[in-house]
Image (spheres, rainbow, N blue to C red):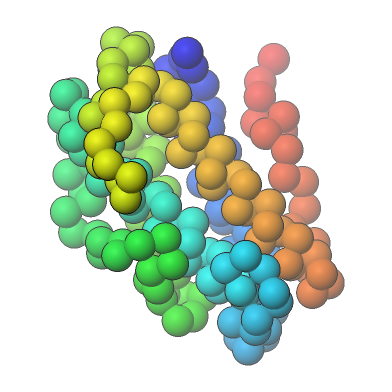
């Protein structure tokens, strides 16, 4: 089971990497951001939209946690994903605004979570039906999903000649 400190670290890493990713993407001309690069979600823009889709879907599921996290109340004002390919924006500035707000919510959630919260189970539903899973493990999946797709986005940027810089979690781990 992850510790509360692990979740806080992963939230900080998430926000830091998203800033680096969007800063790097902003160095590309707009048509290049939306260009089909034959990636799983087509373009860099499609990949960034997917990460936001996954985040909003999971954060809404996390709203059902028995702890009723106050930080997730902000999700009521956020757009709802219709699926994993939902388009939250057709350009980088639109996505950046949503991404920044989501990262604020995720950081606040991480700060609010207790050890007892991590140990509880969470009931949720997806396209395959109802599920009940360990909340701490679901949070690990949540952060791993982001990392996986940021890796894809980083590869697309690298192929376009843009270096995102150091992406290692190790850079945020203190002594």
User: Does residue 72 appear in this view?
Assistant: yes
Q: Nearer the viewer, residue 34 or 123?
A: 123
Q: Residue 37: which quarter of the image?
A: bottom right
Q: Nearer the viewer, residue 77 or 49?
A: 49
Q: Nearer the viewer, residue 135 or 126?
A: 126
Q: Which residue is at 73% across, 38% downward?
A: 168
Please state if 43 lies on the left or on the right of 46 as rendered. right
Q: Residue 40: which quarter of the image?
A: bottom right
Q: Position of residue 10 (x, y in %)?
A: 53, 32
Q: Which residue is at 34% across, 12% downward?
A: 119
Q: Is residue 45 above or below residue 116?
A: below
Q: Which residue is at 40% across, 73% downward?
A: 87
Q: Is residue 91 above or below residue 148?
A: below
Q: Position of residue 57 (x, y in %)?
A: 33, 50
Q: Position of residue 7 (x, y in %)?
A: 46, 26
Q: Of all residues shown, which one is farthest toward the bottom?
A: 31
Q: Which residue is at 65% across, 81% downward?
A: 36
Please state if 142 lies on the left or on the right of 113 as rendered. right
Q: Position of residue 171 (x, y in %)?
A: 71, 33
């Amino acid at each position: 089971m992850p510790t509360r400190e692990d979740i806080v670290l992963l939230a900080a890493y998430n926000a830091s990497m998203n800033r680096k990713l969007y800063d790097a993407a902003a160095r590309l001309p707009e048509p290049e951001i939306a260009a089909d690069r034959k990636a799983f979600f087509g373009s860099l823009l499609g990949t960034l939209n997917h990460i936001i889709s996954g985040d909003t879907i999971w954060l809404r599921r996390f709203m059902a946690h028995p702890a009723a996290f106050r930080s997730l109340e902000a999700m009521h004002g956020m757009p709802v994903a219709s699926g994993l390919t939902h388009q939250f924006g057709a350009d980088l500035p639109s996505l950046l605004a949503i991404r920044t707000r989501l990262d604020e919510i995720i950081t606040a959630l991480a700060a609010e979570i207790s050890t007892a919260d991590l140990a509880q189970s969470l009931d949720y539903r997806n396209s395959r039906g109802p599920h009940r899973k360990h909340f701490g493990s679901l949070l690990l999946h949540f952060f791993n999903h982001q990392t996986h797709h940021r890796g894809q986005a980083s590869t697309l940027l690298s192929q376009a000649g843009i270096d995102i810089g150091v992406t290692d979690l190790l850079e945020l781990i203190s002594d």
